[in-house]
């Protein structure tokens, strides 16, 4: 992966880890460096449609050089259209599966936040209660005191907990959540609890541990029962420990160490280092449904949803004007004085952007490599344009399968 400065949502995935894994014993990691003569930029897109989404995806493939791009757009009347461009496998030239599964990175944070807020609604967790109340003695270190950090501060990235991702091993391997927490606690706090804002995967790592302690069940089980099933998501899951293969139809995800270097198939690299902060697999259509169901109040009561939408100014790695709530990000739209709600995510091999508007429009776009800053901005422009025009999708509704 690339450094954080280059990746707007890079903290959801440790980009340096992908690069170091390739640089230190790629043969031992059994990854495939693709030397087949299939150029993503030369791959034929799906049949052109006279709309900005298809044009945008085609440009991502032909001009930006991503192997594949996928999008799902739902208008204000619930009609959905799916799009693809590029190839799903650069070695074989296989087609990109419509609504294929991808690793959704930090969109996972929104799912984790929903579970926590359901526990708040049930009276099992206090939003302004301290971490030590639920995980006594676990979160302590240099300037770090779980007796002063609140649950709200975890979900809002105002706790001051340092990110663990910079200290991950060069090896691509399995991690346990408490091992990851240990990597964070070896560092000094970024600031006093509530004294600033800084994006840190450690916040959601602790939130996931809190969920497990309060419920007595694995985080993946809680997300499945409380969010995935309740929202009717048919193609979303939290990978089990050691589960590396993506279960359903999917485009392969690729890592590139530097511009012009060979693409490396990273589809089945172990995702456990991301855990509560970024481990989920989903589709564009399921993400659109998840954020739509959340904003409609179908996943958490209104009081807790209002808290999730209570935001503070967000800095790097988010775009200018973005604000962070509790697992939700608001981003200004160009077409009027309003915002859309989502999160976005980055995981080795995949990048996703999207969200929903107050009137029910929903868009999500995915590409099969982690892009540089310019390509990232192109992704965000596609989302913006689609949300500004999705109120009048022509044609009939396309299925999610």
Image (cartoon, rainbow, N blue to C red):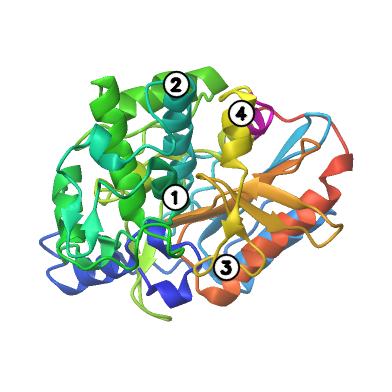
Contact, CB < 8 Å: mark 3 with mark 1?
no
> Mark 2 or mark 1, which is nearer the start of the sequence?
1
Left or right side of 127 for 272: left
Magenta residues (range): 292-297
Name the element at disc 1: loop
Name the element at disc 3: helix
Q: Which residue is mark 2?
A: 226
Q: Which mark is residue 106?
A: 1
Quadrant of the rendering where the C terminus is positioned: top right
Q: Main secondary structure of the magenta part?
A: helix
**Badge 3: how crowded within 10 Å, few (<14), some, or many (20+)?**
many
Q: Give the residue drawn at x 66%, y 59%.
A: 57
> Mark 3 or mark 2, which is nearer the start of the sequence?
2
Residue 275 shows up from this direction:
no
Q: Position of residue 176 (x, y in %)?
A: 16, 44
Q: Give the residue drawn at x 19%, y 38%.
A: 242
Left or right side of 239 for 69: right
Quadrant of the rendering where the N terminus is positioned: bottom left
Closer to the camera in the image, 119 or 40: 119
Which mark is in front, 1 or 4?
Answer: 4
Q: Which residue is mark 4?
A: 303
Q: Give the residue drawn at x 25%, y 48%.
A: 146
**Alpha-carbon span between mark 1 and mark 4:** 24 Å
> Mark 3 or mark 4, which is nearer the start of the sequence?
4
Q: Position of residue 197 (x, y in %)?
A: 46, 63
Q: Which mark is residue 376?
A: 3
């Amino acid at each position: 992966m690339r450094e954080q400065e280059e990746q707007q949502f890079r903290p959801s995935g440790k980009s340096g880890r992908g690069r170091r894994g390739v640089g230190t014993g790629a043969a031992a990691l059994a990854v495939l460096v693709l030397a087949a003569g299939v150029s993503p930029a030369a791959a034929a897109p799906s049949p052109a449609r006279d709309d900005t989404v298809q044009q945008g995806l085609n440009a991502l493939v032909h001009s930006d050089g991503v192997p594949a791009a996928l999008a799902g757009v739902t208008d204000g009347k619930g009609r959905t259209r799916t799009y693809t461009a590029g190839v799903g496998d650069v070695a074989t030239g296989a087609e990109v599966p419509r609504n294929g599964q991808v690793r959704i990175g930090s969109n996972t944070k929104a799912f984790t936040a929903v579970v926590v807020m359901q526990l708040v609604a049930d009276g099992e967790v206090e939003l302004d209660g301290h971490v030590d109340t639920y995980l006594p003695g676990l979160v302590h270190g240099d300037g770090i005191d779980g007796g002063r950090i609140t649950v709200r501060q975890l979900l809002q990235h105002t706790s001051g907990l340092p990110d663990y991702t910079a200290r991950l091993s060069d090896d691509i391997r399995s991690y346990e959540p408490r091992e990851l927490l240990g990597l964070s606690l070896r560092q000094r706090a970024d600031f006093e609890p509530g004294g600033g804002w800084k994006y840190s995967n450690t916040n959601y790592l602790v939130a996931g541990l809190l969920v497990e302690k309060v419920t007595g069940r694995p985080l993946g089980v809680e997300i499945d029962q409380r969010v995935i099933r309740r929202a009717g998501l048919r193609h979303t899951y939290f990978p089990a420990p050691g589960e590396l293969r993506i279960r359903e139809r999917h485009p392969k995800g690729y890592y590139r160490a530097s511009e012009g270097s060979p693409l490396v198939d990273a589809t089945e690299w172990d995702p456990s280092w991301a855990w509560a902060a970024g481990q989920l697999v989903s589709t564009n259509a399921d993400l659109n449904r998840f954020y739509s169901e959340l904003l409609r109040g179908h996943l958490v009561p209104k009081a807790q949803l209002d808290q999730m939408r209570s935001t503070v100014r967000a800095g790097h790695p988010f775009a200018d004007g973005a604000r962070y709530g509790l697992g939700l990000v608001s981003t200004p739209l160009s077409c009027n004085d309003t915002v859309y709600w989502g999160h976005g995510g980055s995981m080795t091999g995949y990048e996703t952007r999207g969200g929903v508007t107050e009137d029910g429009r929903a868009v999500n776009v995915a590409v099969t490599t982690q892009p540089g800053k310019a390509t990232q901005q192109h992704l965000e422009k596609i989302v913006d344009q689609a949300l500004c025009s999705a109120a009048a999708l022509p044609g009939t509704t396309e299925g999610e399968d």
